[in-house]
Amino acid sequence: MKRPLYLLAIPAILSLTACQPMSAEYTEAEAPKLLQVDRAASHISLAFAAGSDQLAAGESARLERLALAGRIGPGDRVTISPAGDPLLQERRVAAISSELLRYGITAAASPLAAVPRDHAIVIIGRYMVTLPACPNWSQYPASDFTNLKSSNFGCATASNLGLMVANPADLVAARELAPAGATPAVSAVTRYLTDKVKLPETTSGATALAASSTAGGAPAGGAGTSTGTP
């Protein structure tokens, strides 16, 4: 008796079906472990004496009140947009920056058009970071046949980063690197080139090395010979 061919094909189809990979039961999209950073911006207008880089009367006290009230702080991204010609703008930015530094606030220049005459616009960008929903046990750990990472994987790293960051704005964009101090940089290179590098004075090893160098001999325990001038 001949069997129909489709009956012989059924076992082969079933065996191939069993080898197909299972669809993922969980994906990272269900509970992403990402930090959310929100920004709120406000601005104030400061007045200057006509044609000058001197703040108008009462403006310094106004900045002090804003700082003490917490409306502007070291964690904010602050930009200054003054009116005037380029040289006057530079001096006015320096004047406001000097006042803000008294409260630990740094600011950067950001030219804007249509700033009122003898004024400067100070924009205060404040950022807030929201932590992900952790711990995350949304993936059932007992029936994962896809060999995926746990749904809680990375939760601690993301949460710790959000809690430790001093300025949430740094999660959005890094701050510009300030120029290096010329005097200490040149002094260090000069000491290196003239073989007058300063050794630490708090460690016994450095003290022994300095004494050995002064005496013109090799360090203790070394096999070298003296090269100093008697």
Image (cartoon, grey):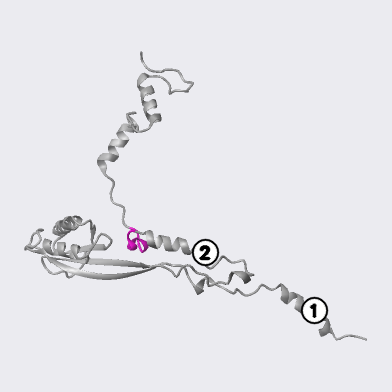
Amino acid tagged 1: Pro
Residue at the (38%, 61%) spot, across then down: 163
Q: Quadrant of residue 95?
A: bottom left
User: 26 above or below 106?
Assistant: below
| Spot occupied by residue 63 in the image (x, y as percentages of width and height) | 15, 63
Q: Residue 153 shows which numbered tag?
A: 2
Residue at the (13%, 64%) spot, across then down: 62
User: 123 above or below 184?
Assistant: below
The N terminus: image quadrant = bottom right
Amino acid tagged 2: Phe
**Magenta segment boundaries in residue numbering:** 166-174
Residue at the (19%, 65%) spot, across then down: 69
What element does badge 2 sit on?
loop
| Spot occupied by residue 155 in the image (x, y as percentages of width and height) | 47, 64
Q: How far is disc 2 from disc 1 in space, using C-alphas?
A: 40 Å
What element does badge 1 sit on?
helix
Quick one: label 1, few (<14), some, or many (20+) residues within 10 Å? Answer: few
Asked if residue 167 is among those painted magenta in the image, a careful observer would answer yes
Can residue 103 be seen in the rendering of this structure?
A: yes
Q: Residue furthest right?
A: 1
Can residue 110 be seen in the rendering of this structure?
A: no
Q: Identify which residue, 58 or 177, lies in the foreground.
A: 58
Q: Residue 82 shows which numbered tag?
A: none
Residue at the (42%, 60%) spot, across then down: 160
User: 225 above or below 20?
Assistant: above
Q: Which residue is mark 1?
A: 11
